[in-house]
Image (cartoon, helix red, strand yellow):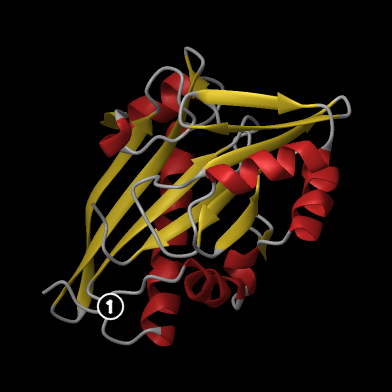
Amino acid sequence: MAGRQLASKWLKTEALLSDSRVAGYIPRTRGYSEAALLTMLSQYGNVVIKPVVGGGGYGVIKVFRNQGQYGFTYMDTTRIYRDFTSMKHALNVVRVKRKYLIQQGISLARIAGRPIDYRVKVVKVGEGWEFRSMVGRLARPGLFVTNLCKGGTMLSCREGLRKSLPKVNTSAKKAEMRRLTLVCINLMERHFPGVGELGFDYAVDLRGKIWILEVNTRPQ
């Protein structure tokens, strides 16, 4: 049984932020507006904007500020502008016509220059939940999105952690991801009764900190 599906990234993010054990793992997230974009670029230097409803990496754009210039990367193309206003006009042409949110940019650990993140998939069986997979997703060369449908490469969670962060304790990091997943399952069930499968997208940054990028109720 697939169970309930929830399209809105906002609703799922709010549910996770409601628990202090999880809130510290959530990148700063705001609704899209030009003022919010400018503020978050000033704070973080780079952000990701993504449609509130959508998956598979569709419509996801990385926006950055560097030495007074502004730019964005969409798919495999990066454009740089002299000022925020010029960049904003170009960005408005590229954005698909739907609601967006802005998420604090995370500097993902990399393998040979390619960013990697992780997908943990769980399914409800009877009264309990089972872990079905924990895998790394390595971005296609030249892309920042790791989605397999966009050419990403799948590898085991252990291999991904070992190759991208050789100094980090792989077993401890994997165990932390599992513990966090169990807390989040509980939260998602409490807020959205009827969910039957969940896919958690985790980032591990250059310092080895885990971040929850997204929760999918219709994981690919």
Residue displayed at 19% across by 81% down? 127
Q: How many marks?
A: 1
In the rendered view, would you say 31 is above or below 107?
A: below
Q: Is residue 117 above or below residue 138?
A: below
Identified at 47% across, 41% down, the residue is 172
Residue 26, position as x, y percentages in the image: 61, 58
Q: In the displayed structure, does residue 201 sit left or right of residue 105?
A: left
Q: Amino acid at mark 1?
A: Val
| Residue 90 location (% of width, % of height) | 65, 39
In this view of the protein, can residue 25 be seen by the observer?
Answer: no
The one of 158 and 109 positioned closer to us in this rendering: 109
Q: Nearer the viewer, residue 53 or 203?
A: 53
Residue with the most extreme right position: 68
Instruction: Please state if 189 lies on the left or on the right of 187 as rendered.
Output: left
Quadrant of the rendered image containing residue 151: top left
**Which residue is found at the position 63% from the left and 53% from the top?**
103
Name the outermost residue toward the top.
112
Q: Is residue 55 visible?
A: yes
Quadrant in the picture for residue 27: bottom right
Q: Is residue 11 above or below residue 147?
A: below
**Which structural element holds mark 1?**
loop
Q: Position of residue 210 (x, y in %)?
A: 56, 46
Rendering coords of residue 69 (x, y %): 82, 28
Up-down relation of residue 138 to residue 194 (above or below):
above
Q: Which residue is mark 1?
A: 195
Q: Residues within 10 Å of mark 1 (few under 14, many from 20)?
A: many
Q: Quadrant of the N terminus?
A: bottom left
